Image: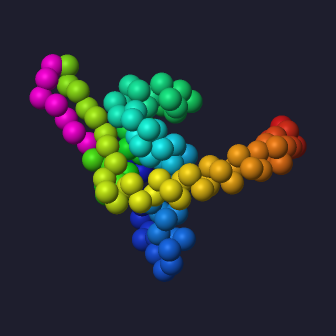
Amino acid sequence: MYERKIIPNLNCGLDLIGEVLYGKWKIRLLWFIDQGYQRPSELQRKIPDASRRVLNIQLKELEDHGLITKKIYPVVPPKVEYSLTEFGETLIPVIAVLGNWGDEHEELLRSLILNRFNSES
């Protein structure tokens, strides 16, 4: 696994939230866990473009940052469920606002992203 060699800059709230939420799937993982998708297989189905390995890494980072908890049931085969912590629940309104902004500007954002993608090809 990648190990950071330089301590991140944590001088303001934006640096801190970037450090906690940096990762392609973390915001979606938090959102889906809040919506009731708690098992790793459910999360994998909701985010099919992500590999199981990457999801596991990002789930572990969210757990390390105190945003989610992992419960392992002592059964065979093992059963794992994730849930938001009280701290993690405080992010859901923020994620909702970001999602609404994206929905409001969907057409423009999609056009800009696709234009950039097409110009790189």
Q: Is residue 37 above or below residue 90?
A: above
- Where does the image place residue 35, in percent across and percent down from the top left? 44, 38
Residue 73 painted magenta: yes
Q: Residue at x 51, y 48 (%)?
A: 27
Q: Is residue 57 visible?
A: no
Q: Residue at x 65, y 50 (%)?
A: 100
Q: Is residue 39 visible?
A: yes
In the displayed image of the protein, which residue is found farthest to the bottom?
11
Q: Residue at x 36, y 31 (%)?
A: 40
Residue 5 painted magenta: no
Q: Residue at x 85, y 39 (%)?
A: 118
Query: In the drawing, does residue 79 fall left or right of residue 121?
Result: left
- Where does the image place residue 50, in percent across and percent down from the top left? 52, 33
- Where does the image place residue 103, in percent across and percent down from the top left? 71, 46
- Where does the image place residue 32, in percent across and percent down from the top left? 46, 38
Q: Quadrant of residue 59?
A: top left
Q: Quadrant of residue 67?
A: bottom left
Q: Is residue 65 above or below residue 72?
A: below
- Give the residues in magenta: 70-76
